[in-house]
Image (cartoon, rainbow, N blue to C red):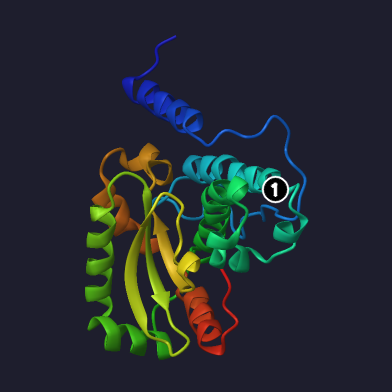
Amino acid sequence: MFVSRRALVMGASAALAAASAPRLSQAQAAGPFKLDPLAYATNALEPHIDARTMEIHHDRHHQAYVTNLNAAVKDHAGVAAMPLSDMLGKIGELPEAIRTAVRNNGGGHANHTMFWQVMGPGGGQAEGELFAAVTRDFGGLDTMQARFNDAGLRVFGSGWIFVTVTREGKLAIETKPNQDTPLMEGRRVLFGNDVWEHAYYLNYQNRRADYLKAWWNTVNWTKLAERYAAAKAGTLTI
């Protein structure tokens, strides 16, 4: 049977992405943390993010973080009972034996939970108080997007770009390596983009710049407005 070169390349890329996913524990560890289903179909963000990438990213990578976080806290009832945002905010106070596992897997769980929420089909446009804040703090939407994308290109290896928001509504851009999050320094995340290769490699390969530019087509501005209001009200968690 004839197999096209493109099919071979895509098949190899899918295998690579699956193989590079964080390893699950031998059994799915029960615990307080759960992986919520996506609020939209895996193909809802196409052509900007393809369905196969969404399946691997959500069902394998994110599930691995949840599974391994539950495994890390299973013998630490006090830690397991903490809300995730509080746990990450007190990362330096956690038992040393589980601190790294919570940092990596708790951070991964928080970052990805936020990530799925701030994307969606038909996400509207920036307006109202959020648009006013973007204009005030960045000089406009185009400027914010350009600065955000530039920051994403400067992340070496794997990591995230975030827009953080204060209780007063002030916005700022920052980057973090691996699965670190601004929550670990007590800041709140309005939104962020994942620049680990598993987030984009099937479609974009090494073209991170193209992914960063295309990602803005998936942003759910309605959800971002809700998160902005929650931040100002002091109720935004992850």
Residue 219 shows up from this direction: no
Q: Residue at x 53, y 63 (%)?
A: 114
For residue 98, side relative to residue 219 (left or right): right
Q: Residue at x 45, y 45 (%)?
A: 50
Quadrant in which the C terminus is drawn? bottom right
Tell me where residue 25 sits by quadrant.
top right
Name the residue nearer the viewer: 152 or 10: 152
Which residue carries the number 1 mark? 70
Name the residue nearer the viewer: 41 or 173: 173
Q: Residue at x 53, y 55 (%)?
A: 107
For residue 66, side relative to residue 146 (left or right): right
Name the residue nearer the viewer: 22 or 37: 22
Q: Amino acid at mark 1?
A: Asn
Tell me where residue 162 sits by quadrant.
bottom left
Residue 226 shows up from this direction: yes
Label 1 Cα crowd, 10 Å radius (few <14 / some 14-19 / many 20+): many
Q: Position of residue 19 (x, y in %)?
A: 49, 28
Q: Position of residue 88 (x, y in %)?
A: 56, 62
Q: Residue at x 63, y 63 (%)?
A: 84
For residue 52, side relative to residue 196 (left or right): right
Q: Is residue 117 above or below residue 45?
A: below
Q: Is residue 198 above or below residue 123?
A: above
Q: Position of residue 202 (x, y in %)?
A: 39, 37
